Image (cartoon, rainbow, N blue to C red):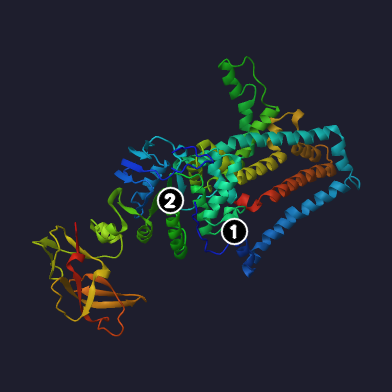
Amino acid sequence: MSQNTTDSRPDDQAGASINVEKVRKQYGATTVLDDVSLDIRAGEFITLLGASGSGKSTLLNIIAGFTKADGGRVHIGGRDLTKVPAHRRGLGMVFQHYALFPHMTVFDNVAYGLRRHGTAKSAISGLVAEALEMVELGHLAKRKPSELSGGQQQRVALARAIVFRPPVLLMDEPLGALDKLLREQLQLEIRRLHQDMGITFVFVTHDQEEALTMSDRIALLQSGNIVQIGSPSDLYERPNCRYAAEFIGVSNIFSGECRDGVFDDRINGAQYRLGSAASGQALMVRPERLAVRPGIALSEPEDNAVEAVVEDCVYLGSFRTVHARTSGGDLVVARTDVPRGEDGVHPGAKVTLTWKIEDGRVLA
Amino acid sequence: MTATLTPTEAAPSGPTEGRRDGALRGRLTFDRWGLLALPLLVFLLVVFIAPLAFLIASSVTDPTLGLDNYRKIFTESVYLRVLVNTFTVALTVTAVTLALAYPYAYLMTIATPRWRALLTLIILVPFWTSILVRSFALVLLLRDTGVLNSIAMSAGAIDEPVPLLRTMTGVVFGMVQIALPFAVLPMYATMRTIDRRLLDAAQGMGDRPSGAFWRVFVPLSMPGVAAGLILTFIQALGYYITPALLGGPKNTMIGELIVQQVSTVLQFGFAAALAVILLGTTFVLLAITSKFMNLERMLMGRS
């Protein structure tokens, strides 16, 4: 993989792998990254997900070379780039607030990287036009960034980052400043860009839905540590801790103890059977795995059940959410189909919430 | 490569921030509280506009009706030399000030808040001190037996005092230190609005840090530089106290000439004509500047 991309485009320019090894960063007494290790495969779309202060942006900036780690190493494409400054790493970067050069036209913004890489003058305008076509902004090449909408500015930022065919594209909350509708469109478009280019994408966001939509894999960070890494369904279906379960999607969590294949929920005075031996103090069930039955119904032999009183029913068109309070005071959310008529589930009604044994997950 | 992204938003033809701002201001209508500005308007009319009108009038009527006063300035070599000298000094002061102020303003933008407060204080303390006091202090510093020459002589760098006082060097020295805050502050105001991520972006695209500085930071700091330059230059044209104290008869500036004409030789019409030239030059410079830059934005420190 050549660092000095010229106008020739090597076909082997697929993505590069990234290996982060025990990277550490402290600001004063605060540990921002606590010996984080992360292996990113060549060509994958990985999302660094976390709340603000989790260290996700710092990790991205260390990969980019903008921030110096206090310890640890970063290999990209097999090369140790720990001590290599950002401008020699040859990576593409998209910033949250676009960071377009306000004094340059869209064309000059996109051509900036090519000029620095020594691309032949004759080739530049073709490559810029091609990159702008990829984001369908070819007709705006002569505009200044201030004359573009937020979404268009972010598209220019994308074109600018990919025009010199970097092996890795880093994105720091690139959609954070856009409204919801636009964000959802750009999510899919960035995803498509990833599939077409085949390079490695590292995407930072605090929005779990965005992470689920876009990623091959998600690394969930919490106060400077990666708490779980896996595919979107891994993180949603099989969270490995309470933090992961609560951060991603909506979760109902019962507190209690595991004993002899049974989860003892003392708060609600109920016992739930477990599919397999486990240990932990919490049992999680996703809202869509819960069934709501009016009255005190006996559960099927293969189901677990807890009684509750409905507090609210929210009709959402294609589905309905039922908020119910258990005798122990837990607020449980269930997501159900919309019934054709009155089904006895309404505020104030006594209901039984049931779920299949394998849909409950014990968390540490 | 066949990837495309579909733009779905409306193409913007919309106004930029600044323009929207302007429209808002235009909508503010006059209410009775606005009348409170009246005293100041009357005051300005009496003490500024009216005297200015008299000044312009007397420049073409005193002692005789016509443009004799102006003709005298541009034909007699004594006066022409004063004009040339004034511009030379003002340009030199501006150039030196720029060279000193730009790095200082840059240092202010990258400093930690504590250091920035200190740097701001250093630039502002002289600003709050009377020009007369500062110029006298410079006399003590620059004269033949002054601090600079004493140190240089005792260090053996020179054998006899280098004349600094009553020279153009002395004048420039004194004027630069007075002009510095006027150059540093607008530059700093512009520089601090420059997003540091732009420099990261440039380096991320393969530019060296120095390249990113020249191609991104410097162009974006230009409005502040222009504001600083124009403030410095216009001020420098009209300086009186400093050149009077630090300069010699060979480098008289227009301000000194005006005072001399009014208080010594009592040629009011001629002094008025000189003042009108000074004023006219200032307006022309401002007009040229505003053609290229948004003056309001420059002086308000927005970018």
The residue lying at 53 percent from left, 36 percent from top is B210
Pick the residue in front: B244 or B254: B254
Query: Which numbered mark, 1 or 2, is in the foreground of this view?
Result: 2
Q: Report in which chain the residue with disc 1 lies.
A: B
User: Where A297 sits versus A234, above or below?
Assistant: below
The answer to whether residue A135 is seen in the rendering is yes
Q: Report in which chain the residue with disc 2 lies.
A: A
The residue lying at 31 percent from left, 83 percent from top is A340
Q: Secondary structure at mark 2?
A: strand
Q: Quadrant of residue B231?
A: top right
Amino acid type for the residue under numbered disc 2? Met
- Marks 1 and 2, how far apart in space? 26 Å
User: Where A331 sits versus B230, above or below?
Assistant: below
Q: Are marks 1 and 2 on the same chain?
A: no
Q: In this rendering, would A44 be left or right of B215?
A: left
Amino acid type for the residue under numbered disc 1? Thr
Residue B44 at what x, y percent from top left? Answer: 71, 56
Q: Which mark is residue B16?
A: 1
Q: Quadrant of residue B176?
A: top right
Q: Secondary structure at mark 1?
A: loop
Residue A29 at what x, y percent from top left? Answer: 31, 43
The residue lying at 63 percent from left, 26 percent from top is B142
Q: Residue furthest left?
A: A260
Q: Which mark is residue A171?
A: 2
Residue A44 at what x, y percent from top left? Answer: 37, 50
Q: In this rendering, would B1 be left or right of B160?
A: left
The residue lying at 68 percent from left, 33 percent from top is B92
Label 1: how many residues lie within 10 Å, few (<14), some (14-19) or many (20+)?
few
Q: In this rendering, would B61 be left or right of A46?
A: right
Q: Which mark is residue A50?
A: none
